[in-house]
Amino acid sequence: MEIQHFSHHHPLVFIQAHSVASKAALCLGCQKPVEGCSYGCNRCEFYLHKGCAELELAPKIQHPFHPKHPLTLLPKSPYSWATTWCDLCDKPFWGFSYNCFDCKLYLHINCALLQSSIAANFPNSLHPHPLFFIQNHNNEVETHCSGCQKPMSGPIYRCLDCTSPRRFNLHKECAELPLEVNHPYDRKHPLTLLPQPPTHPQKCSCSLCIIQWKGFVYSCSLCNFDLSLADFLFPPPTITVASHEHPWMLISRKMSFVCDFCGTNGDHSPYFCATCHLLVHKNCISLPRHIMITRHRHTISLSYSLRQNQLEDWMCKICYEEVDIRYGNYRCPASRCRYIAHVRCVTDKAIWDGTIMPEGYDERSEEVVDEPWNLITDVVEQIRIGELMVASEIKHSYHDHNLRLTFSGKTKDDDSQCDGCTRPISTPFYSCEQCKFFLHKDCAELPKEMPHPFHKHLLTLLNSRNDYGYSWCRACRRLYQGFSYRCYEGDCSFQIDIQCMLLSDTLKHPSHEHSLFLVHNEGTSCSACFKGLYSWDVAYRCLRRCDFSLDVGCATLPLTAWYKYDRHPLTLTYSNDSEPSQLYCDLCEKEREPNRWFYYCADCDNSLHLNCAIGDLSYMKLGNKLKVYRHKHPFTVVKNIWNCPPCKGCGEVCNGQALECKESECNFTVHLNCLWRRLRSI
């Protein structure tokens, strides 16, 4: 069976089941995929749905979308060199269309066949052009409603005089809204329907300006009250959450209040619990009842009815400012624990990782805290000391041989360092003399997993380093060897050394008269070295709000250091009232800044820069090897004090540890920083 169709110059053959070389084909009439029965010209690859081919299309029609002129049927877009767009649905088309040549108006066949009528009596105050009512637009119109800002669906009203992208469309229910209503949020005056929000000041804090609402509003100019169409047509129901036993009701009005959960100010649309008489922010409704943070060893619970006699002091253990117990806070339910913190402090992204205790959690479980599991995997031998049994010989997970405990005396090598924390060995310690492997007793008993206030996730102990033989501590910014704790949560790679793990969230440092507390970066700089803090850094600030901060690197500086030309230990010193001519370093002979910390011997009047006294490798173990990018040989960490060659980079003699390459073509000693500067220049 063949037909001669106006849109093609060859006869079209009837195809029972369309399959043209297994290729998908589009109907050249409606531009939708051809399936089932169709008509086609295989030679030209021209195909039409059976329904499109059999449509009785008049060569000219009078259409309500364009009553001024008749529309002429075209078999395809007249512009073969450019895309033609339908003036109703704003979609591109290449197939059948109706066209008004004088007005340059095009309707592709799907829109031209839609049943429509002109909407009568639509108020000019909402839109100046006539609107067309379309009962069923078959998903051709995909824009949003100009009234409620939601996607178009169901019967719609559409304006053809407005051009894209400022096309005007309305849901049927939005087009039929009353122009004036009485509303319980403003009982004094009726609200008037406006096509757009009234003009407000540039930094207005009302809810419509915050969300940048662009649709219809009900407004009272006398009260300066505006209600979005979304709130009018689709008022949110009462909200029920698992963390609160009663429903929450939205008060959709601009009002000032103090949130009963977080204690901070709000300025619009609070949620209200009629049973508890609580006003809260929307974001605070879903605050969990019980959470875990690394700043505290117990689960902490949300409380909004704390009485004054329940705690002796009400200082937040995170920001160390007063907690107003008239409002919500998180506290520890354990009877002997007095931990309390502001809601905003606890739920800060740097403090809390989002872990919520499951429903059915029993607060009484916090009365007993399990001891952490440690890495002494096998106790080989024990001894009794008083009433305690102590492991005198152990098999440790990170060493192949048994380790024996020593309570007194020194190692055979006075420079021995702990393989866990790299500090000089002090008693008591475990050792393997066969391998010269040493561990302080505390390092040998470190738990496998451990929370720490520096980081919001649980940290895992590991004994591995990168391919270059060292690691970088995210807390103090030093290179180190030995044990470390690392985060394996998602993409997080937070890693710190053992010495930083020994720090807590408060610090009493001899450089300052007041106690210091841990804060995440607040855009400050360190009062010791004056370096700025990165966004991920933590630091210690003064508890009394003095203008004093310490980064972790300066907070962990040793209180004493040694200088090879001084028989006394040098003391970490925090200020200097000497004459400007006396401010120089006795090692590098360069000037010192008067306000920066330094090491000093009062007996011998020796002064050293911090880095000159402790070096770049103070957390590296002597004898260990490491690799450095762009150098083909490994370097050995050596103690460089007497009769040593000068640094190949700066020509100065080292005061302590340095890197040594003994290969025949190299045979040099170098400071770590000098080596990096040299390689970067290459």
Image (spheres, rainbow, N blue to C red):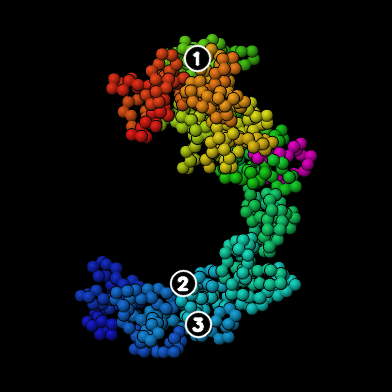
Residue receiving disc 2? 165
Q: How far apart are marks 3 and 2 (CA)?
A: 18 Å
Identify residue type, mark 2. Answer: Pro
Q: In this view, does 462 lie above or below 386?
A: below
Query: Residue 132's mark?
Result: 3
- In this view of the protein, which residue sits in the foreground, 235 or 583? 583
- Is 315 magenta? The answer is yes
Residue density around tag 3, few if under 14, some if 14–19, many if 20 or more, within 10 Å: many
Residue 608, how many percent across, how many down? 52, 22
- Is 456 magenta? The answer is no
- In this view of the protein, which residue sits in the foreground, 485 or 8? 485
State the residue at coordinates (54%, 39%): 533
Tell me whether circle 3 and circle 1 mark residues in contact (CB < 8 Å).
no
Which image quarter is the N terminus in?
Answer: bottom left
Q: Is residue 201 left or right of residue 48?
A: right
**Residue stretch in magenta:** 302-320
Q: In this view, does 224 lie to the left or right of 634?
A: right
State the residue at coordinates (59%, 42%): 522
Query: Residue 565's mark?
Result: 1
Residue 462, how many percent across, how many down? 47, 30
State the residue at coordinates (51%, 17%): 563
**Residue 338 at least partly seen:** yes
Where disc 3 sits, the SS reads: strand
Where disc 1 sits, the SS reads: loop
